[in-house]
Image: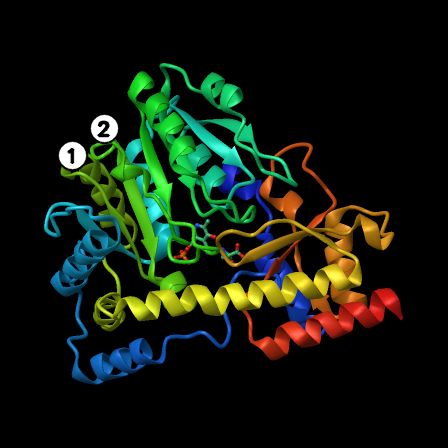
Amino acid sequence: MKPGNSILSSYGTTIFETMSRLAAQHQAVNLGQGFPEGLECQEVIEACAAAVLKGPHQYPSMMGTPDLRQAIAAHAKRFYDLDVDWQSEVMVTSGATEALADCLLGLIEPGDEVVLIEPLYDSYLPIIRRAGGVPKLVRLSPPLWDLPREELAKAFSDKTKLIILNTPMNPAARVFDRDELQFIADLLLKHDAYAVCDEVYEHLIYDGLDHVPLITLPGMRERCARIGSAGKIFSLTGWKIGWVVAAPKLLQPIVKAHQFVTFTTPPMLQDAVAFGLSLPDSFFAKLKTDLAARRDKLKVGLQRIGFKTLEAKGSYFLSADFRPLGYKGGDDDFCRHITEQAKVTAIPVSAFYQDNPPDHFARFCFAKKDEAIDEALRRLEQFFKG
Ligand code: PMP
Ligand code: GLN
């Protein structure tokens, strides 16, 4: 039998799926895979139920329903004062994962260089490689995750087609500030490159920080494809509704990829998300305060047990150094060990790096019910402190 594609075949099952399966097998409290519990937006679920009964149920326009595209444009104006033409600059996708794949398949020519910042989300590299792109990796390291500007500048060349920029960042929970974004914008201008901006955690940002989309910086309007995810905004990750906002010329090749990958996305989910994006500012503010409270609960509890926690300014994730607990193995072993023995699951941070990863940090997802966080902490405390 002939083998399948060698690039994709070389990847194993994702760490998220692997750890969630292991958590289920050991009845562990799953603070691994990033999905929220107890935060699901009820009004949006009800809007979906009504839309299911009302219909229509046939293929919507491949760009997305007009209502949702208008809502995405209005959302960009409301939060970032960004003027977006809903007809020529917005495309709805089946989750941000599809949006990312569409951008990469639509923009990369074989041989193009793509700048990436580690730690990175696991879907980027396989798609870039499959599209014939040449990854140029720049590394942020814990505990501070500082942006190494000199190395970043060196990673760019005349062959650079694009950078993928994820802010707020998974798993580092870092939020890039305006000065760092300006540095990246200058590199894009210098090298005539684009940015695929993975902004799925745009509303999950804490301590009074603001999310700044790169596309809002001078000269960036034509160079950025901004990706969003309803799954994260409404705590409904299984719905897989995402979108891309980009200038018409940049969006066109991305639309071609979408046209041949999924073509369109379920209409009732789109209707419900359109409704959700029009919820008042108080909804978006409450999401932040609810999540920040859960983050703080987890942080205090992990510190009490002896973990050295890192800062978490955005996203769902808090990472912690487990060496103070006396554990001598690597992070992969540690996460399996606590899943099997303490019955609490986390994700090894090394999974977000290619080579020579830092190997003593575990990523915990705090977007869970208070009871789940309390129970996880109780189990870890009992396990490590007896
Ligand atoms: N990018 C990042 C950084 C993520 O953490 C996720 C989480 N799943 C995604 C993209 C994918 O989002 P979606 O579930 O909308 O496909
Ligand atoms: N983004 C989520 C995480 O980092 C998981 C998404 C997935 O399982 N593919 O945990």
User: Height in image: 306 above or below 53?
Assistant: above
Q: In this view, does 133 lie to the left or right of 367?
A: left
Q: Which of marks 1 and 2 is nearer the N terminus?
A: 2
Amino acid found under the numbered disc labelled 1:
Lys
Q: Residue 250 or 276: which is nearer the viewer?
A: 276
Residue found 57% across the figure and 34% down from its top: 140
Residue 332 place in picture, x, y as percent = 73, 50
Residues packed near mark 2 inside 10 Å, few (<14), some (14 to 19) or many (20 plus): some
Whether residue 131 is visible:
no
Give the residue pinned by disc 1.
249
Residue at the extreme front: 208
Amino acid found under the numbered disc labelled 2:
Gly
Residue found 27% across the figure and 78% down from its top: 48
Residue found 59% across the figure and 43% down from its top: 352
Report the number of discs. Answer: 2
Q: In this view, does 192 lie to the left or right of 210?
A: left
Colour scheme used in the picture?
rainbow
Whether residue 87 is visible:
yes
In the structure shown, which secondary structural element does the residue marked by tag 2 occupy? loop
Quarter assignment of residue 127: top left
Residue at the extreme right: 386
